[in-house]
Image (cartoon, helix red, strand yellow):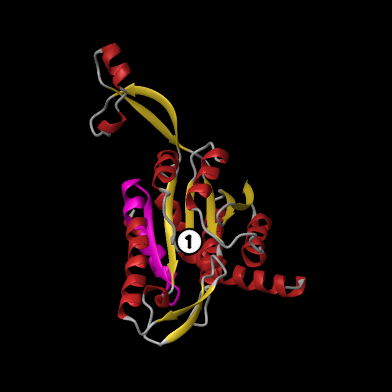
Amino acid sequence: MDTKELLKKVRKIEIKTKRLSNHIFSGEYHSSFKGRGMTFSEVRQYQYGDDIRNIDWNVTARYNEAHVKVFEEERELTMVLMVDISGSESFGSKNQFKKDIVTEIAATMAFSATQNNDKIGLILFSDTVELYIPPKKGRSHVLRIIRELIEFEPKSHKTDIAQALKFLSGTQKKKAIIFMISDFMSDSYEHTLKIASKKHDITGVRVYDMREEKIPNLGMVSMLDAETGKIQLVDTSSKTVRLNYEKHYQEKLNYFKDTFRKSGAGIVNTRVDENYVTKLLGYFKSR
C-alpha cells in the first residue's frame, strides 16, 4: 500500500470513528471506567453510608473504632488495545473482513480514551507479540496506532493469547483498561488471564463471521487454514464433518466465555455484519 492510499484509509477511519467516540462513546466510556483508576488517599473514621468494603481492618482494630480508606480518582487512566492480527482475522464473507471491524473498534476506543485525556497503548499479537507501542496521549499517537492496525504485516499467522497476556503483565505495571480484540479461536490462556485480571480491567471483544460458525453443505471443497497456510479437501456433504467442525467451534467459544467470566473480565460479542456500536454501548451501560 503506497503512502497516499494509506493516509486516505487512515483519514477515512479517523472521520468515522472519531465521530462515534465524540458523540456516543466518550461519555459512556468515562462513566464506565472513571471509578476504576483509584489511588489511596487517607484513612478516616467510618461515617453512616460509607461502603463497608472500604473498611481498613488493621486501623479499626488498632483504635477499636471503624475506619475506612478514602480513595481519589486518578486524573488519567491508561488504555491498552490488544489486537489479534493472526491469519484468521483476514476471514470475511459479507464484503467485510474481520480485520476491518477490528480496526474500527480499536480506533473508536482509542479516540474515546483521547476524549478523556487518557493514555493509549497498542499490542499487536499472533503467537508472539509482533508490535508494542507504549501508552501515550494525543491525536498523532492515535493516528500512528490506526496506521499500524491498517498496514502491519504479521510474521506469524498463528495465535497465542497466553503469550500476549504474559507480555502485558510484564510491561504494564500500573492498572490499565485493557480491550483485547480477537476471534478467540485459541485456548490454554486461563492461567495468564487470571493473573492479568487481578491487576487490570480486561474486556474481551470477540469479532466473528457467521460463516465460521457452521460449514454449509457444498460437497467437496478446498479449504485454506489461515493460521497454518495448509490447503486440504473437505467433504462438506458429510454430516459428521459438519458436526465435528461445529463442535470444535463451540468448544473454543465456550472456553472463551467461561474463562473470561471466571477471571472477572468483561465480554462483548459482535458479528461482522452487526452494529458494533450498539454492542459496545450496551456493554458500557451494563457495567
What's the residue at 48%, 61% (across, down)? Answer: 182
**Where is 52 relative to 28, above or below?**
above
**Where is 40 relative to 126, above or below?**
above
Q: Residue 248 versus residue 193: which sits nearer the camera?
A: 248
Q: Answer yes or no: is residue 136 visible.
A: no
Q: Work out which quarter of the rendered image holds the N terminus and state it.
A: bottom right
Give coordinates of residue 6: x percent, y percent.
Answer: 71, 71
Which class describes the residues within 10 Å of circle 1: few (<14), some (14-19), or many (20+)?
A: many
Q: Is residue 231 left or right of residue 216?
A: right
Mark 1 — residue? 182
Give coordinates of residue 81: x percent, y percent.
Answer: 53, 54
Give coordinates of residue 231: x percent, y percent.
Answer: 54, 75
What's the residue at 45%, 64% (across, down)? Answer: 183
Q: Quarter-wise, where is residue 14 in the image?
A: bottom right
Q: Is residue 223 magenta?
A: no
Q: Secondary structure at mark 1?
A: strand
**Where is 243 relative to 61, above or below?**
below
Q: Exactly how many numbered labels are in the figure?
A: 1
Q: Residue furthest bottom?
A: 219
Q: Residue 165 versus residue 201: which sits nearer the camera?
A: 165
Q: Residue 194 versus residue 17: which sits nearer the camera?
A: 194
Q: Quarter-wise, where is residue 185 in the image?
A: bottom left
Give coordinates of residue 156: x percent, y percent.
Answer: 61, 60
Q: Is residue 260 magenta?
A: yes
Magenta range? 256-284
